[in-house]
Structure formats: C-alpha cells, structure tokens
Amino acid sequence: MKKYNAFENVQEQLKEIKEIIGLEDNIFEQLLKPQKMLEVSFPVKMDNGKIEVFTGYRSQYNDARGPYKGGIRFHKKVNVDEVKALSAWMTWKTAVVNIPLGGGKGGVVVDVKKLSEAELERVARGYIRAIQKIVGHDIDIPAPDIYTDSKIMGWMLDEYEMMAGRHMSGMITGKPLNLGGSKARGFATAQGAAYTLDLAVDKIGLDKNSTVAFNGFGNAGANLAKILFDKGYKIIAVSDSKGSTVNCMGIDIDDLIKHKKTTGSVVDYKGSETLSGQHCMEQDADILIPAALEDYVNEKNVESIKAKLIVELANGPITNHADKILNKKGVLIVPDILANAGGVAVSYLEQVQNAYALYWTEEEVLGRLKEIMETAFEEVWQEKENYQTSMRMGAYALGVKRVAQAMRDRGKS
C-alpha cells in the first residue's frame, strides 16, 4: 500500500471540490500549492555543551482573506508535506468559521521528550529567531499545536519582542494570560468541537447518554473528554501513544486525567482493560473522536469502525479512501476544518483583544465562540444539503468558495 502523504490528500480533496462547486482553473491552480514555503536550520547548544542543528518549516498557504494563521508543531515526524497540508487545512478552516485570516503552519523536527526544559526553551527561541522576518501581527500569526503550549508561546513572544525592540503581543496567540493571552484559549479547540458534536448528535438522533471513544488524550483530547463527561456522555475507550484503556461501563475522566499525570499514560488504569491503541477504534461506541495525528483511519482499518458519528478533533485523521467508505456506510463525519476550528477562532478573538487592549471574561469569549461555531456548523450543513454531498465536502465548498471570492476581489483570477 502506498505510504500516506498528507499533502497529496489535500490536493485530492481540492480536486474533488473543484468539480462539485465548479471552481475555475485559474483559481484552482493557485490553490494547489502554498504561496510561500520556508525551511530553516538553526543551531542550539544542548545541556552537555554540544551544538545540535534543528530543522524547522513555515508554510504560508494563502492570505487572500487576511494574514496567514496557524500553529507551530514540535514533533519528530514533522516534514515538508505535513506542514504544507496543515497550512492548507488552516486556510479552509479560517474561511469556514468566517474570520479574517488566511492559513499557515509551522513545525520543528524534534523529539521534545528527549529535551530538558532549558533545551526546549532554546529550541523555541531559536526557531522564532529563524522565522522572525516572515511573521508578525499583520503578516503571519503563529499559535500552539502538538507539543507546544502557552509557555512556549511566551518564550517565542519574548524572543520576537527583544529582536523588534518593542511590545508586539498580537504577533502570536495562545500566550499566557499575563502576556496578553485570552481566557478559554487553552481549551478552545475542545470546546468548539463540543459545540459541533452536540449539533451533530441532534441531527442524527443520538442522545447525551451516547458512548464515546477517544484516540488521543493530549490537551485537546483530554479537554473534550472532560467536557463530554461532564455533559453525561459515557466515555468507554481512550488511547494514547502507549495503548488504550477500555471499560464498557464508562471511564471516570477526572480520575483518568489524574492517572495520566501520575503515570504518563492512560494505560493500566484501574478497573479498565489495557489494549493496543488500535483497539480504540474497534469499540462499539456511538461516537469516535480522532484526537491525535493524521492517517488514523485508513483503508486497512476502516471496516472495523462501528461509530455512527466521527468528530475530527485531529487534523486529517481520515484518509480520502477511508472517508468515502465511511460515507457509504452512512457515518456522519464532522470534518477537521469545522470540528477543531475553535482554537483558531479564539486565537482570532485573542488578536482582537490585543489590538484594543480590552480583555473579555471567559463567559464573553465562550459566548462569541459558541456563536461562531454554531453559525459555521449550520452553514456547512446547508452546503452539504445544497450539493447533496458529505459534510466534509460541504465544509470544503463553504471554505474554498470564500477563499476563491477573496482572490477574485483582489483581481487574482
């Protein structure tokens, strides 16, 4: 079987939506590739005194609707095609939720689990120094992603401001609150997904006692599991990089979070069965939440899925081939470019707060987020119905049409 390539997946999706919406060739050809792609190498002195050279990337896919926007990922598997794909998805995502931003993405090839905190800080500062000429509040605004968090954003902001010689808090989002971060940003991706999940549950006639399985229990996965657990959903399976914990009677998510903090994993949780990570998708759950990396559901394992609803908390967790099989089976999929857009939506709200030096309460932020996500869900659903297609293609129709119109308005057609 051909090795999965995330960017080829993006291009296949774009070709499919071109035919559905009748996108003209002049726009289509421009949307097939990022506008800019930067690769950097930067030296970092390690704790043992040796210099290690790290590779980083920043893809700026499209800025027709506003400055590039997208997270920075620290992971040992970061590569050019992954970063390009993620920046494309971010382009459609910001358009789907109708915020005035484009799409970008960055990453560093690094195994953060092998770094001390001091080394991690030096990597973060080294990367932002390497890309500082192409980022800024009105150019390209980074944010957290896998294995990066508010602390790392704070280091990057500090490094950038020292180079600039002035305060520029809007150049990065997902910052600590004391440095201009927004309330609710830490769990915004999960909260946004919860809003879309509730709407999807209503559409297909499930209820709040439905069973849920999670692949991935990082920041977004754990936060969404906690939100759903508190709402009354029954979480029956959770997996991370070390395996799955399964209990058909339901898992106490508050207790599981404590267990993971203590042990570093969800496996070997009391009263639950420990299985391989792959077994998570095979559970008889009503709802499946892919919350880790790309290529989780593919042609090798798609037939084992029993869920009626899939909400993509991760980016690109389902291959195009598997997606078509699931659609034929009648599985409703809330696609990544809608489901996980809560993070970038609150990042936008953080930028607005930075620009006006006027900060909102958590309730105000969540109220705005709820309106953004529910409006986007209904607009995507309408596109799905209009074109008689999947929810993914409905989201693509909405996002790509908005980007394309901005390009036409700029005379780029």
Image: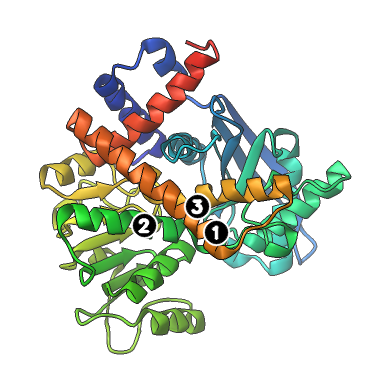
Looking at the rendered structure, the secondary structure element under dot 3 is helix
Mark 1, other Cα within 10 Å: few <14 / some 14–19 / many ≥20: few
Looking at the rendered structure, the secondary structure element under dot 2 is helix
Q: Does residue 269 sit above or below 72 in this rendering?
A: below
Q: Is residue 205 left or right of residue 156?
A: left
Q: Is residue 283 left or right of residue 401?
A: left
Viewer can see residue 108: no
Q: Which of the numbered marks, if any, corresponds to residue 195?
A: 2
Which mark is in front, 1 or 2?
Answer: 1
Give the alpha-carbon distance from disc 1 to disc 3, as whole Å. 6 Å
Q: Does residue 168 sit above or below 189 in this rendering?
A: above
Callout 1 touching callout 3 (CB < 8 Å): yes
Q: Position of residue 125 (x, y in %)?
A: 75, 52
Viewer can see residue 361: yes
Q: Which three-letter amino acid code belongs to the residue tagged 2?
A: Tyr
Which mark is in front, 2 or 3?
Answer: 3
Q: Which three-letter amino acid code belongs to the residue tagged 3?
A: Arg
Question: Looking at this view, is 266 or 191 the one in front?
Answer: 191
Q: Which of the numbered marks, if any, corresponds to residue 368?
A: 3
Q: Which of the numbered marks, if any, corresponds to residue 364?
A: 1
Q: Residue furthest right?
A: 165
Quadrant of the image containing the N terminus: top left
Looking at the rendered structure, the secondary structure element under dot 1 is helix
